[in-house]
Image (cartoon, grey):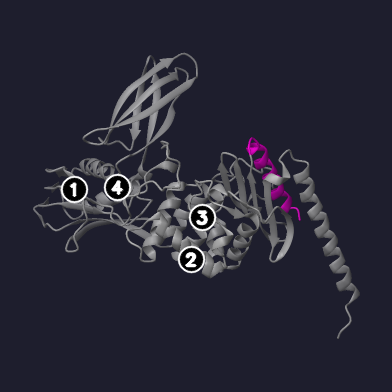
Amino acid sequence: MKPISMFLILSLLFLSEGRAKAKNSFEKILSTSSVPENQVGAYILKDKEIIFQNRAEQKMTPASLSKLLTAIAALNAFAPDDRMQTDLLSSAEVKNNFLDGELCIKGNGDPSFISEQMWVLINNLTRAGVTKIKGPLWIDSSIFDTEYFDESREKNRVDRAYDSPVSGLPFNWNTVNVYIRPIRSETRITVDPESDYFNVINKVKVVSGKKVDLIINKKKTERGESLIVSGTIGAQVPEVVKYASVTYPDLWVGRNLISFLRQRGITIENMDIQSKKCLDKMNVLASSKGWTYQQILDGMLKFSNNFLAESVTKNISVQYGSKPGSISGGIKEIKQILQSKYRFSPNEYTFISPSGFSTQNKISAQKMTELLSSAYKDFNVSSYLLSELATPQGEGTLSKRIKDLESSRWIRAKTGLLSGVVGLAGYAANSKGEVYSFAFMYNGSGKEERARELFDRLAFEITKL
């Protein structure tokens, strides 16, 4: 046996002393904050070396940190460059620019089917020489189930993109922007995208000053919904944007399809809109491809988009043979991927909401960090995951946080926020190129802002190791 060199002994002592100082610095940051230590789960890991921990084995609600599990599973289920496609089909023939029959639009679960993709789809149809369609319109969203709202969500609906219905053929995230602009004593309300699905009823009053107090209600109509905008807006306010989610996704797609066709000079005789599967014998007239999965996961993680998270989960369900795609089917497959690939035992966490929009999700800071550490060593995952996480002062939920970093890209992380819940998890590097995995979670009451500040300080401290 060779004797241990003095250099190696000194190196080990120096390393041990450095780790002790690092641990003390994290302990000091935690103890001097106003956040109770027993409400914080924290774990910092470098390879297999534990740098710091506090209540790391305690299962806590992770909020939107849950999307990390969804994203890592998705990067195992799909190639990052995979795209979903939306098609226009018909069993009728085009004669003298007239499509003598139905037009079926078939969704393939693409959550990125937005106005740009609709334009591409209609422009491609014009090259088939179609200027007139007999109709009716068939809307095929059957790739997903009709459970538009996952049971893990709150029962009361909120008119925001994160609470819109998840359908197999969504359009513009199944939401609409509502712009309210005061013009002297009246208001102008503009809906984007513009279609006759929404009938706007303007009850807004202009008042002096800059105060805004607006409410949007909806009521079903034959064509779609009435959008009843009421309240007050100050005359000195340039413009306000509010959001409204749609209640009837298939009808919403159909009305917008008609609107886009008209704008390209294509008319429809029978504008009846039916929720109906396209037939196998139908011919494809036009197609439009959506974002890549990398782009979808980028939007899901950087901006914490719940709609994208649930759509991806339903697509994971379809990918593994469960049709129609469902949240329950997708969660089953996500758990299977985590267990087989990352040794996640089912009793180590509770995962019922792929977006984290539920306090029933539970996981410890240790398990979250170990997952991130394992994913970092998986080249096919980490090479994309790192670019999809938010960075301080960059795009997304960290854009206004941790401003003192020498390099904003030294931290790449996912944020989490619910009432009484704050989270931050991801990766941090130092100037020596060492990469650390970490997860911080707060479950308490009334200290959300302080917890966020605490986690920013802890993440910043990692970069100084």
Tell me what residue is drawn at x 60 percent, y 60 percent.
372
Note whether residue 79 is visible.
no
Query: CA gap, disc 2 to disc 3?
Result: 12 Å
Q: Give the side of residue 423 with respect to residue 107, left or right.
A: right
Up-down: is 306 above or below 344? above
How far apart are the two marked residues, 1 and 2, measured between alpha carbons? 39 Å
Give percent across and percent down for residue 115.
Answer: 33, 45
Could you classify mark 1 by the number of other residues whose Cα lies within 10 Å: few (under 14), some (14-19), or many (20 or more)? many
Residue at 33 percent of width and 23 percent of height: 202
Main SS, magenta residues: helix
Q: CA distance from mark 2 to mark 4?
A: 38 Å
Q: Residue 225 at what x, y percent from top left?
A: 28, 34
In the rendered image, which residue does mark 4 sit on?
Answer: 119
- Eye-nearest disc, 1 or 4: 1
Quadrant placement of the N terminus = bottom right
Q: Residue beneath label 3, please?
A: 351
**Label 4: which secondary element:** helix
What separation in Å lies between label 1 and label 3 (alpha carbons)? 39 Å
Magenta segment:
445-465
Amino acid beneath label 4: Trp
Q: Residue at the location (80% across, 46% down)?
A: 28
Label 1 vs label 2, nearer the camera: 2
For disc 2, the marked residue is 336
